[in-house]
Structure formats: structure tokens, C-alpha cells
Amino acid sequence: MSGFRTIVISKRAKLESLLGMLIIRSDKEERIYISEIETLIIESTAVAITAALIVDLTAVGVNIVFCDRRHFPTSIFAPVHSHHSCAKNIREQINWDKDIQLTCWKKIVQEKIRQQAFALTVINKQKPASTLSTMIEKVREGDPDNFEGMAARLYFVNMFGEDFSRNTLRIENSALNYGYTLILSSFVREIVASGYITEIGIWHRSAENPYNLACDLMEPFRIIVDILVYEMPLHEEANFKHYMLKVLSSQIEIDGDRQSFVYAIRIYLRKIFRFLNGDTDNILSIHIIRDSQNEL
């Protein structure tokens, strides 16, 4: 699997592969061992990248994110397959039991609302946090009552203000969208590395969305982004894309242990896939770690 560094290419450059290294040719030449790279974000459209480099990056599971002319993530590069039992897993995925999928979505929604309640406690909004907590046990299989939507409406107005809407052109929305894409790209990579395909989701089923499953499974992790945006200093707003890279260095407690962002996703997905395949009765809860060593 890939390493620990996030590399951002934000100006004109040529990227090549040589002897296991990423070669960045720009104003000066830089060399980085591919084995050290976890995520490569190509922000500039004035970047040329060789096919050999893409092959070498995907061979070790590096997460590659391409951005448009506004420097916003527009596509994610994932290998066609990277798991020894990919064909078997995809057959299982196509045949996942419908009732188990509905129960899985219920548990994901419950965990998402639990995380939203936690986020509101972080910013001292105890009353709405308590209201969210009362919703958790009311969620039914498949969430037919749309508690996810009700929770989101209450959550966002308390997080970002009464006049906040996810459909407006505000710096908060730009930062949220950027951060969510970073999480999505990490989930896409780990899903593919586990031998499944991202197009077939358990709740999201859009024919135009190639990442339906990743959109489903990432939901509880969104609050990492939300808290970062809430706490974003004014002086970081002009450079929010680099500020939001903190998402990738988050620490998460899962199954009783502190894990890096990537390993927490990996552990979480293993349990989700076991649940969907009928091998366990529960999914794992997560806890975003906030301390002096790892302040979101």
C-alpha cells in the first residue's frame, strides 16, 4: 500500500517516473520516492504526467486527484482492480441481500447523526446536539422517514448559522466541497483496493455517479471536514485548499485504537463489507480524536 505524504502540484510541471521515484520538473527538479506518497493532488491543468508514472502510482495504491481550472477536485484515478479476489467480491456485491443493505444504511445514518451530535458538542451547541441524539434510535431500516435529511437541516444551521445553505456560493461551501472530495477519494481507493467497485451503492444509485458506494460509506466521516471548516481562521480562507489537507492527517479512534485517517477507513470498510456479506451483525463506530497533538 501507499505511504504517508500528500503531494500537491499547483503550478506548471512535468511529472515522470524514474527508478521508483516521482520526478517533478518545474522551476527546479524534485524527486520523491513513490513508496512515501499517500495522495497526489494535481491542482494545475498545466501539468503533464506520463502514463508510466500513473501506472507506477496506482500499482502501490497512491490516491490521485485531478483538479479543474478553478483548482477544485474534478476526478479521481483508481486502478481497475487491485485485489486478488476482485471477481469474487464483485459477484458478492451484486448479490448483497436487499434487507441487509437497508439495515446497513440504517446503521450508517445512525452513525452519521451520532457524529453530527458530537460535532455540535465540540462547538458548545449542547441543545441541538441532544435533539440529534434523540433521533438516532428512531432511524428505521432504509431510513424511510428521512432522519438523515432532518438531522442535516438542524445540524448545518447550528454549525454555520441560520442563513446557511449548502446551495449558496460561500467560502464555507467551497471548503466543505473540497474536503468532502478528499474523503471521497480516499474511500474510492480503499474500496477498489478491497476488491469491490464504487459504481454499485447500497443507497446512492445514480446512473451518472461512478462513486455511489463511496458516497454511501463515507457519510460518518464528513464531520472531520465540517469541524475543520467551522474552525478555519480568517487568514486561511484565501488558501483554504491547503488548509483542508489537514483532513488527510486526522487521527481517529476505531475499535478501541487510535489510527491514522487512512487506516481507520480501511478498518471501517473491512467491517462494513463483512456486514454486507452477512458475516457480522454490526459496523464499527468512530471517534474523531481532538487533543493537543492532533487538533482538527
Image (tube, helix red, strand yellow):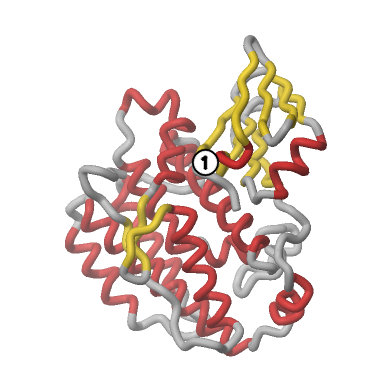
Q: Amino acid at mark 1?
A: Tyr
Q: Secondary structure at mark 1?
A: helix
Given residues 226 and 284, the one toward you in this image is: 284
Callout 1: 10 Å neighbours few (<14), some, many (20+)? many
Q: Is residue 94 left or right of residue 155?
A: right
Quadrant of the snapshot with the C terminus: top left
| Residue at (71% x, 81% y) in the render | 92
Q: Residue furthest top?
A: 27
Could you say where residue 179 lies in the image, as x and y percent from the top left? 48, 44
Could you say where residue 91 lies in the image, as x and y percent from the top left? 76, 79
| Residue at (36% x, 71% y) in the render | 255
- Quadrant of the rendered image containing residue 205: bottom right
Residue 106 position (above or below residue 286): below
Residue 59 position (above or below residue 258): above
Residue 202 position (above or below residue 2): below
Could you say where residue 7 lies in the image, as x and y percent from the top left? 56, 32
- Total label count? 1
Q: Is residue 119 left or right of residue 175?
A: left
Q: Residue furthest right?
A: 51
Given residues 270 and 135, the one toward you in this image is: 270
Residue 233 position (above or below residue 25): below
The residue indicated by pointer 1 is 178
Q: Is residue 296 left or right of residue 244?
A: left
| Residue at (65% x, 51% y) in the render | 61
